[in-house]
Image: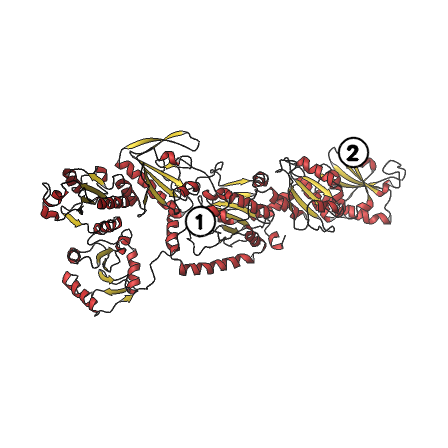
Amino acid sequence: MPAQKDRWFPSFSFLLFCASFIPMLGSTSVLQELSPQEYFSSLQAGRASLAYFSHNVSPGAQPFLEQIENSVEALQDYGISVVKVNCPKEDVSRYCGKENALRKAYLFRGNMLIREFPTDALFDVNSIVANVLFALLFNEVKYVETLTDLQNIENALKGRSNMVFVYVPATGTAEHRAVMEVAFVYGTVHQFVLTTEATLLKDTGSDEPDASSARLLFCHCQQATDVAQPCRKTPLEQDLTVLNIHRHLKLMGAPLVTEVAEDPEKVSTVHLQLGLPLVFILSQKETYEADRRTAEFLAWQLLGKAGVALLSRDLVDLNVLLRSNVALKTPDEGVPIKYLVLEDTDEVITLVEDKSKVEQIQEDEDEEDEDEKENDNQDVQDDQVVEAVSRDKKRELPLEQILTLTEETFHSAMLKAAQTVVLFYASWEAVSLAVLQSYAEVADHLKELGKTQDYVVTDDENQPYRIRGVQGVLLSRVNCWDWPGVCTTENVTQFPTIKIYKKGEQPLMYNGMLGTEELTSFIMLSRVSCPLKLMTIDEAEGYLRGELPSELSSYHHTSVLGVFSTAMSKAKEAFIEAGSILSGHVTMGMYFEDDALAFSCCGRFFRSRKYAVSPPALLLARSGDRSVEGIALSKESAQDIVQMIRYRLLDTFPEITVQNLPHYLQLRKPFLILFSDGDIGQLESKEMLKLAKGIPQQAFVPCWLNLKNTPVGHGVLKAYFATVPSLPVLVWVNLHAGGQVFKFPPEQSVTETNILSWLEKLKAGLEIPSSTLSEEDWKPPLPAYDFLQMMDTTAPEFTLRASYRHGDGQEQQQPEGSEEKATVREETPEEAGVKAEKVQSPGRDLRGTAPRLAGREKQAKRHSEL
């Protein structure tokens, strides 16, 4: 043990260790001299004493008596008295009468003789203390000479107790004494076995043992429940001193893996108290079992060198990168915990053995982070999602109204309701967890809107239970990490994915924004057939007036009616196909009869001048607007109809938000944007709306952006002008052709006439652009991931299968059998070792830690939340 670590051995541990050896009050370190009669009369039952009988001290015996006198204090620590018995010349008793008897020392317990020692075997204090304790501890310390004897002791201890096996080149040495002194304290806890046979050291598995050096092996026999199962052995790699042996045994008795549920800075274990580092494996619920196996495997490799703790991110708020999977805490005061990203346990072992590697790895990570900051803008967005999830992770989500599906229950659940909504997600992935929050809010909204209904469903064990949902709509979820087979069958390769299943129809996939309002609107609108077949003119007229179920009133904005004659089969089929594509996003109706011409031109209920279209045609009725817009269908393909409807549904003068910006970007037209810090004035709004309605065929997109509602607009303006200009400001930008940005003259008022005049100058090239944007293609900064393929390449033992029906929360549940009440739950090496032995291949890979894929080799660029 290095000297630096010795300094960290706390004084109180040493005092506790030595407390058993404090001599009795009134004892003395001076060698007592008694007569035979006085000596034998002073012997007390159970008390040990070492006696040397002598008539007179010859010059040859003087060195022995000096060593005997030097050992008085050491032996008194163990309650053993040392006495020189002066024999009278006339005494011819057993101990005084014979010459050879006077060359021995005698060990008594009470008045019973335990052992005779030749004086030449007690040549110094170490040999005296070692041999005396060895004789007294004949049950606690077994001596073996053959491998058979050693194996017999080992087999007898399996499943019951642990063994401390010690090899010393010879008895009576300093190492022998150190072992005996520790055995005096730990002999009732562990079985000590001593040998001087070097061949036994080799038979225990030591590589090229040095017969000249003492060795100590701690044998974990208590965990070996089968006779054929060998005892794990952990060597003491320091010299055999009392302090080192005591420290080693303390470490062997410490928990193999400590489960932590508090701030790592506040954690203190026996390893830190003894001057050793503590390694944290950062985990979360979904990877708990894999992380536990990794931690146990690592703990066995570091046993005696460092401690290992399992730290759950779900229970502790850590302000560190999510990709960090290992933390290292040293016993040095004032040194912060190092959070690292490692790929396998070998790197952890290297860190423990070579501290300089910590700084090297951190430097490499810092350089990697700088590179990623330059090329990976997606990390910023992902980290914001992760931060939001982490901030709310303690909030338990009300998922009682959402059915948890498995491979066994998926298909049967699709038959329970007219419409089943399924969220496919990965419970370890940040965006999925964020959407799960929105999904839970959707359940509450639907419950408020419609009548509730109890659905009888079954769990994994085919046991029925009730779940309350909305009449006709059943919300459910599938954790693709637990049930990849379901997600593969349903062709789900991206998380999160939402699909709606209706009996006898193809599933409808949602591809819109993942907020609560957008999801609720999609689910509610998808309940209505799209297109809705209208059989009479009265039904068509009511449809255009917005006569839909009351629960749809909040989500219905524009009604689209297709008008066809019975002979227009191709156009009708294209319209029906367009309806299946737009289902959930818009309400569509279809009317076709032989009198369709009367409907469009001179029908009794509709004025022909109002529509002025002939079938095939579309009629658009916007909510809040009494007018109905008629559009002739010149193209009869489904995609053309979808594109036309989407275009017509766009607002004339929209407020640009994060949610609707993609719809307007798809037009690939220049933007005329009025940026404002709040609502725009009535004058500006009136002039801009007049301009928008007068534009022939929407040559550009007139719009406005409220920086209070959409703060990202500040960043947009900085990209245009380097600094945010005075607001309001009118800007022309063509993102799809040249990227030139023009600023409307601030001294002019925003009127239709001034704007049109300014646009003419732009067209004539008379205005100088304020800036020119990069021609870089606006593609996603990262490639899409096939998550299921990632799962397939993951080690099989890392795949979890667990489902929870009730009370699931953002905070992942504790694994079964965990004790949440205790801040730190510990498991001894013997308990954990049995579990570790059952795992055929525990693995050296840290890729099972949280984040689960943190150590995976980079495939191009990766999302940071992985």
Q: Is residue 223 left or right of residue 122?
A: left
Tell me which amino acid carries mark 2: Met
Q: Position of residue 292 (x, y in %)?
A: 52, 43
Asked whether residue 25 is in view, the answer is: no
> Is 45 above or below relative to 220?
above
Mark positioned earlier in the residue sequence (1 or 2) = 2
CB within 8 Å, label 1 to label 2? no
Q: Secondary structure at mark 2?
A: strand
What residue is at 39 percent from the left and 40 percent from the top?
478
Q: Is residue 426 left or right of residue 832?
A: left
Q: Position of residue 824 (x, y in %)?
A: 50, 41
Q: From the image, tell me which residue sits under label 1.
A: 318
Q: 487 or 534: nearer the eye?
A: 534
Q: From the image, tell me which residue sits under label 2.
A: 112
Q: 82 or 752: nearer the eye?
A: 752
Q: Say which quarter of the image contains residue 100.
A: top right
The 10 Å Cα crowd at callout 1, few under 14, some 14 to 19, many 20 or more, is: some
Q: CA distance from mark 1 to mark 2?
A: 65 Å
Q: Say which quarter of the image contains residue 401.
A: top left
Q: Residue most toward the top?
A: 464
